[in-house]
Amino acid sequence: MQSGSTLRAKGKLVIPLDKIPEEIDLCLRNASQFCLDARIVSEKSSCEHALGLCLYAIEELGKARLLQGLAASARKYGDKVITLERNKPQKFFHQSLHADLGKLGFSQDMNPFYDHRCKLFFGRGLVGQATSERIIRSLDGQEFHSFSELLQAFEERARESGKDVIDIDVKETGFRELAMYVDFDQEKNEWITGRIKFASDEIDKMIQDIEMAIKLFNRNEEYADM
C-alpha cells in the first residue's frame, strides 16, 4: 500500500481524466464530513480544533475546485490525463493573479495537489462567495434607496459577522498548525497551543458557509454539464 508521503516523494501525479469526477465527489464528501466533525468538536470541546477541521474542509473543497479547472483545460486540449507536478505558481493560477502571487506567498515551485496554501486559496474563494450570500440573505426585508445604501449595509453586516474565512491569510503557512498542534515559542521560552481564538458562534457561521460553498460547487457542476 502506498502512503501519501510515498506519492509526494514522486513529485508527479498523473490522473486519468475519467477519474476526476469520482475524485471531486470524494473531496466534497470529505469536506462535508469535516464540517460535521467540526460542529461536534465545537459543541463538545474545542473551537480551535473545530477551526482546524474547517480548514481541512476548505482544503478539500479547494482541491475539488482545482481538479475541476484542470479537467476543463484538459478537455479543451483533448488530453486524456491531468498531470500534477512541481511547477511555477503561474502554471496553476489565473493570469489576472500573476502579479499578486508573491504578495500571497506563492513564490516557489509547488505541486498544487499537495500544497496546503494553494488548496486553501482555491477553497477560500468559494467559501467567500457563500459568506457573501449569507450576509445578503440577512438583509432581506430591509429597504434601500440606492445601491450605495445597500453596499454600506452589507459592509456593516460583514463587520458585525466577526471572523470568517475571508480573514484567513494563506501566506501564514502555519495557520492550521496553530489551531491543531502544540508548538514552542523560542522568544517567549514557552509552549503554545490554541493561539487562534474563535468563538463557537463564529465557528458555526464558518461551518454554515463551507456547507453552502459545497452546495454552490455542486450547483455550478450541474450547470457545467448542461
Image: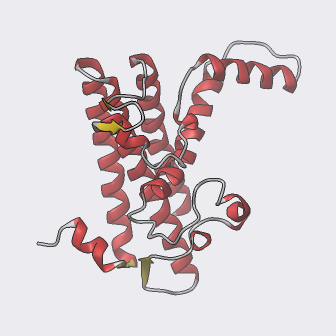
Q: Position of residue 222 (x, y in %)?
A: 50, 55
- Which residue appears at 57% of the width and 61% of the height? 106
Q: Quadrant of the N terminus?
A: bottom left
Is 158 situated left or right of 202 in this image? Answer: right
**133 or 162, nearer to the observer:** 162
Q: State how the image is colored.
A: secondary structure
Is 214 situated left or right of 180 in this image? Answer: right
Quadrant in the rendering for residue 186: top left
Q: Does residue 41 lie above or below 22 as drawn?
A: above
**107 or 223, nearer to the observer:** 107
Q: Position of residue 66 (x, y in %)?
A: 49, 62
Q: Position of residue 122 (x, y in %)?
A: 52, 54
**How many callouts does the rendering have?**
0
Is 195 situated left or right of 38 in this image? Answer: right
The residue at the far left in this view is 1
- Which residue appears at 48% of the width and 33% of the height? 209
Quadrant in the rendering for residue 194: top left
Residue 226 seen anywhere in this rendered image of the structure? no
Q: Does residue 127 lie above or below 19 as drawn?
A: above
Q: Does residue 164 lie above or below 27 as drawn?
A: above
- Which residue appears at 78% of the width and 13% of the height? 143
Residue 106 seen anywhere in this rendered image of the structure? yes
Q: Quadrant of the C terminus?
A: bottom right
**114 or 58, nearer to the observer:** 114
The residue at the far top in this view is 142
Q: Position of residue 212 (x, y in %)?
A: 47, 37
